[in-house]
Amino acid sequence: DRERPYGVLFAHGRRFDAYHVRFRDVARGGMRLVTPNNPEQYALESARHYDECYGLAYAQQLKNKDIPEGGSKAVCLINTNGLSPAGKEFVMRKSVKAFADTILDLIVDTPETNENVVDLVGKKEVLYLGPDEQVITDDIEWIIQRAACRGYGTPAAFMSSKPKSGINHKEYGVTSEGVNVYLDVALRHVLGIDPTRDVFSVKMTGGPDGDVAGNEMKILIREYGDNVKIVGIADHSGCAEDPGGLDHEELLRLVHNDLCISNFDRSKLGDEGVVHTVDTDEGIKARNTMHNRLEADAFVPAGGRPNTIDDHNYQHFLKEDGTPSSPLIVEGANLFVTSSAREKLHREAGVVIVKDSSANKGGVITSSYEICAAMMLGEEEFYEHKDRIVDEVLTKLRDLARMEAELLFRESENYKEPLPYVSQVISDTINAATDALASALDQLSEEDRDSLMPLFRSHLPKTLADLSFHRVKESVPEQYVKNAIASTLASKMVYKEGTRFIESQPKESLADIALRYVEKEREILRLREALEGAEGLEEEEKERILGLLERGGARTALNIY
């Protein structure tokens, strides 16, 4: 019953098999390398290889709702058994190159590929990659150079997180910035906690040296100071636990020095604090159960393998009296909790769960803007203005996270639906509206399409738009621009008007309604400007009328309720 992907690529090499799954013609997602430690683990990973790639790509599709690219994922399963450390490293790097070259074989439009590829699609394929587990800087640079050599139209955009002209997710904490917005909104809605004033506790998986976990620790301490008690952290090396809260300065030392949690200074623990390491059976058991055992207001999985909490073990998250060890879960890591386990935790114990496709979308938003910048600016030009562009990207992703978080809780509370269900509905509604709009845009005249270009400009960070918007037609694929306009308008409507408004419209009328919505918004803007400049009205009266315009807005002007 699951949704059919737009496309699947499969590559087989000497020591690797790899899938690339995507859900739209224009798609972006990370490439990860999986290197099992023994033959048994390799067999297990091989059996679930496609399902893992599909699941990650589908999760990406749900979280990519705010951006032009659909969701995709590439998973390269590499057999490194029996190899020395140096041999393993050599095979991993060769596998990345072979897989990337295979993808380019299938998508570049050159005489060489046209002679050897049977094209049943009949249009340009636009794919973008990003680094995921075990992909290193050398891989990124090689892939970009290879894309240029092979004739890919926008080689600098083919791979994100470039050292100089990229926006490094870990350096800027982009995923965690979004995760923390959802945590903030959830604490207020679910537990009545104002984290800027009230004390609260958090437990996490993922270490101080990890991207999402390490940055989330920094942001928690930056935003809430002594109000936040981080009572437990588990990573690959072990776990640290302290019911009074782990020492903030020591955590920041580990984060800044890229150290895992086993390096936590024991002298900084409270009377009941402890550090377990995985060099003992007891330590392994403590690490593997930390997320279940410790009590906290919120659990933030920010690292760990997919499906850690599933149908068979979800009850371990509950205490003896049946109440949860944490009443709130905000999924910073992908697929940490299975969908069926989410349902059971909510139904049986009232656990409120903010789903990964909502909570950790900050990374994909950032990578999308990096792709835009790579197409519209040269490397030196981007680098010169990088600080301002990154600041604007962070503002945009926080705003998008807050708009979705507020809609998520509003609809969950209004319609008495669990958050994961509402999260899925929001993604599906935006994606359906995007697809309807993208199809409708194909039927518009060039003049009508040009009239919608301000939507694409508004999607971009201001500095990027100011520097390069005049280059769009020559440097950005037409499919990409079309998807950007469609996704911008779709997400704007859903976040402002709600999912039920969109779902209640006939599918065949949705695109027409959306285009009329744009025109009505322009009318509202002209009215606002006229009102703001009007004389003879008291300021209080003017503000009241402006408020009515804002609340009624384009939807009322359409006479659709």
Image (tube, helix red, strand yellow):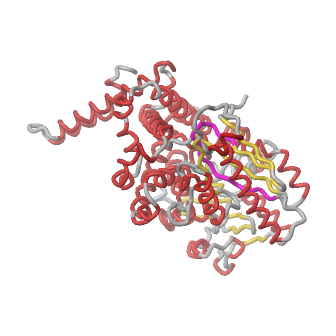
Q: Is residue 345 visible?
A: no
Q: Main secondary structure of the magenta part?
A: strand
Frontmost residue, 2 versus 402: 2
For image coordinates 68% across by 61% down, the residue present is 135
Residue 30 in the figure: left or right of residue 372: right
The quadrant of the image that shows the N terminus is top right
- Residue 154: x percent and y percent? 53, 51
Displayed quadrant of residue 93: bottom right
Q: Residue furthest bottom?
A: 267
Question: Is residue 416 depicted above or below 99 in this figure?
Answer: above
- Residue 347: x percent and y percent? 68, 36
Q: Which residues are magenta?
A: 21-35
Displayed quadrant of residue 148: bottom right
Displayed quadrant of residue 64: top right
Residue 394 in the figure: left or right of residue 270: left
Q: Is residue 114 visible?
A: yes
Frontmost residue, 81 versus 152: 152
- Residue 410: x percent and y percent? 48, 37
For image coordinates 41% across by 43% down, the residue present is 473
Question: Is residue 466 depicted above or below 224 in this figure?
Answer: above
Question: Is residue 541 depicted above or below 292 in this figure?
Answer: above
Frontmost residue, 154 versus 394: 154
Q: Residue furthest left?
A: 536
